[in-house]
Image: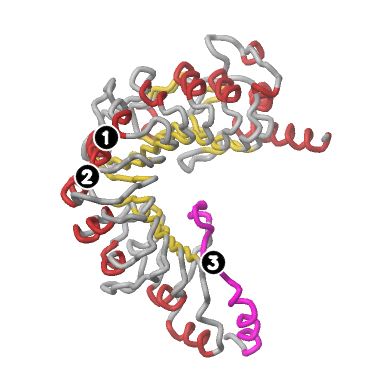
Amino acid sequence: MLRDEDFCLWRARVPRVKHIGTCPGGRWWTAPRRCLLDISFYDSLELHGVIPIDLISYAGKDRTDSVTFRRVISPHVVELAFSSYPPSGPSYFSSQGLKFTLPHTLRALRFEGILRFDLSLFHDALLTLPCLEVLRCLNTFPVSDAVLRHLLSSAILQELELGNPPQDFRRCQPAQTLLRLQHLGLRADRLEESLAVLTLLDTSRLESIKIHHDYDRRPLATRDDPHLFESLLSCCSTLLLKKIELIGTADGYPPQAFNINVKNAEPLLKFRNLEELIITSQGGLTFNNDLLELFSRSWLGMQHLELNLIHSYWKNVIQYHITLDGLRFLAQSWPNLEYLDICLTAKGCSGNSIENLPLDHGQQSRCMKLRSLGISCDSRVEAEPIVVATFLHNIFPNLSTIRALENANLPDKWREVQEILKNLVSRRDCTL
């Protein structure tokens, strides 16, 4: 039970609050689970002058109840974000069948997570948001034709992700529009369907694309398709595109999926300003040191690279031939690399031991910004952990964390590598 002095304390501090919830753009699943609050609680806050709050942004996690949404959201909010990951319930809002108003000042609306959300709750509001610049709702049910036509006619929308299939975009595309997107996210069965949408739009300002595909319906492309990314060259500016993201999901056993190799990845190399490449798949990925060397020579500004599968029990359909020598190429060419997820075998290349791998200890062959390395379920250590850690420390001097992807436990040898890296970094810092 709250006392009067508690409300006095709240009244003094709460008005200064500008953001409620998790950090926008952060790792949503690390945030604490929130409880649902009934209307009497907010009546007490209002009675004691605690609310309304002049919020700038709000981020709700898991089941966000309609009472909280209605009583906390101020008419001046510019950013709303919601996230939901298992074991959350199937709905963001506990009150069903309600329409929700959104402030006319809203500039960004985002829904993150695995559980799909029904945007029809915001149907009327989406038609009356004069300042909306960002709508990222890829994992949602399709919006109505009226909403989609309205969005595709916007002159100020900069980022758009929707759960509508490509045929909806073709049907609702207006004859004339001022829409000039910087980011576009689509759900599609096949890559060419997404590219067909890009041909309908003005992509002269497009800097980022995201394609979410479902293997359990149809494969993204024919296996070993040599023209997998060729069409991107005709749809997107090779100078402006900075981020490509392909996310795959499947509920059943993975069929023959697309295969990325040295041959069909060649068109990607022409996007010289690429800074982020994210490919998440269940199968058909063939990566090797030669491909990494091509990547490292082509994208000198790379900051974020993810080449991985999703589920560990499908690892037998992935072919990785990346060794520590491949990482050396990245360290030599990518001084700005901050995020790396990759599956590799911790050994030398072509039968050489790690100790014999050529290393230039000069600054030009070291990546100072990488502090965390993500490894996949079948990444192996085939040398003494001290040797592997020393090699990694030479090319990534600030690397101190090894992360196991797919929510798996970090293998013992990699855990040893991580402890040695932490000691090497801390010892160097103490010396400095």
Distance CA(mark 1)–CA(mark 3) = 38 Å
Task: Give the residue furthest to the right.
Answer: 431
Residue 309, position as x, y percentages in the image: 40, 34
- Which badge, 3 or 2, comes first in the chain's sequence? 3
Q: Which contiguous range is marked in magenta?
A: 4-30
Left or right of residue 34, residue 234 in this image: left
Q: Residues within 10 Å of mark 2 (few under 14, many from 20)?
A: many
Residue drawn at point x = 26 percent, y = 51 percent: 177
Query: Disc 3 marks which amino acid?
Result: His
Residue in view at x 22 percent, y 37 percent: 196
Q: Nearer the viewer, residue 237 or 350?
A: 237
**Sequence-earlier tag: 1 or 3:** 3
Q: Is 16 covered by the magenta stretch?
A: yes
Q: How crowded is mark 1: few (under 14 residues within 10 Å), some or many (20 or more)?
A: many
x, y percent for residue 264: 33, 21
Q: Is residue 61 above or below residue 195?
A: below
The residue to which callout 2 is attached is 166
Q: How far apart are marks 1 and 2 (CA)?
A: 10 Å
The residue carrying mark 3 is: 19
Q: How many marks?
A: 3
Side of 289 relative to 417 (left or right): left
Which amino acid, by three-letter code, is at mark 1?
Answer: Leu
* Residue denoted by label 1: 191
Q: Few, some or many C-alpha atoms within 10 Å of disc 3 (few <14, some 14-19, many ≥20)?
A: some
In magenta segment, residue 22: yes
